[in-house]
């Protein structure tokens, strides 16, 4: 889920970049369009408007991601997330995790997926229990979120 959120965010950044570049007449990312020799400024404006509209559609379809992003961060960047931004029942364990230099180095060495294999369920029972994860996110999930998710898949 965090990777999908990152992909959507990345694509929105690209849409913004492409729109600005088209408006400025910069076709570096539009090789086929650039190969046409001369493109009318009016056409570039129309293309930029289409991209702007697409960006707005992404904002509407993925608006739930923005609200859930802080909850994803505890799993994607556990050493950078602010402790006061996570659920209270997880704060003590997150503080312990963030201050463990051995685990921090392991996170740097192996990356996210493999890192979680080195965490002890006994030492961090709340941090990675399914019940806490569900309770943290459940109050923010609505039928609208479910419909949007099902529509995207």
Image: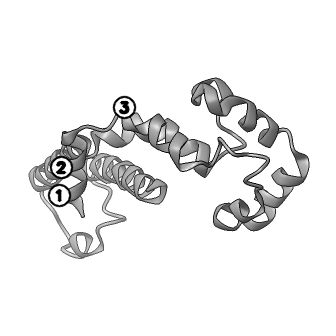
Disc 1 designates what residue? Answer: 151
Count residues near mark 2 (Cα–Cα under 10 Å), then give few for <14, some for 14-19, many for 20+.
few
Disc 2 designates what residue? Answer: 147
| Spatial separation of the CA atoms under disc 1 and disc 3 | 21 Å
Query: Horizontal and vertical percent for residue 105?
Result: 85, 56
Query: Horizontal and vertical percent for residue 95?
Result: 77, 33
Query: Horizontal and vertical percent for residue 84?
Result: 64, 23
Which residue is pictured at 36% across the width and 64% down the height? 28
Callout 2 secondary element: helix
Which residue is pictured at 61% across the width and 25% down the height? 88
Quadrant of the rendered structure where residue 93 is? top right
| Spatial separation of the CA atoms under disc 2 and disc 3 | 16 Å
Count residues near mark 3 (Cα–Cα under 10 Å), then give few for <14, some for 14-19, many for 20+.
few
Q: Nearer the viewer, mark 2 or mark 3?
A: 3
- In the image, 96 versus 122, the foreground residue is 122
Callout 1 secondary element: helix
Disc 3 designates what residue? Answer: 139
Q: Nearer the viewer, mark 1 or mark 3?
A: 3
| Quadrant in which the N terminus is drawn | bottom left
Which residue is pictured at 34% across the width and 49% down the height? 12
């Amino acid at each position: 889920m965090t990777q999908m959120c990152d992909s959507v965010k990345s694509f929105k950044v690209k849409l913004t970049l492409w729109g600005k570049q088209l408006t400025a007449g910069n076709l570096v990312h539009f090789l086929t369009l650039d190969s046409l020799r001369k493109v009318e400024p009016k056409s570039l404006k129309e293309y930029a408007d289409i991209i702007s509209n697409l960006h707005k559609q992404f904002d509407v379809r993925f608006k739930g991601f923005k609200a859930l992003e802080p909850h994803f961060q505890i799993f994607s960047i556990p050493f950078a997330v602010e402790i006061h931004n996570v659920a209270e029942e997880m704060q003590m364990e997150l503080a312990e995790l963030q201050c463990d230099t051995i685990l921090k180095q392991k996170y740097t060495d192996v990356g996210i997926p493999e890192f979680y294999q080195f965490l002890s369920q006994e030492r961090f029972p709340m941090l990675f229990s399914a019940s806490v994860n569900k309770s943290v996110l459940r109050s923010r999930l609505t039928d609208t979120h479910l419909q949007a998710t099902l529509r995207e898949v």
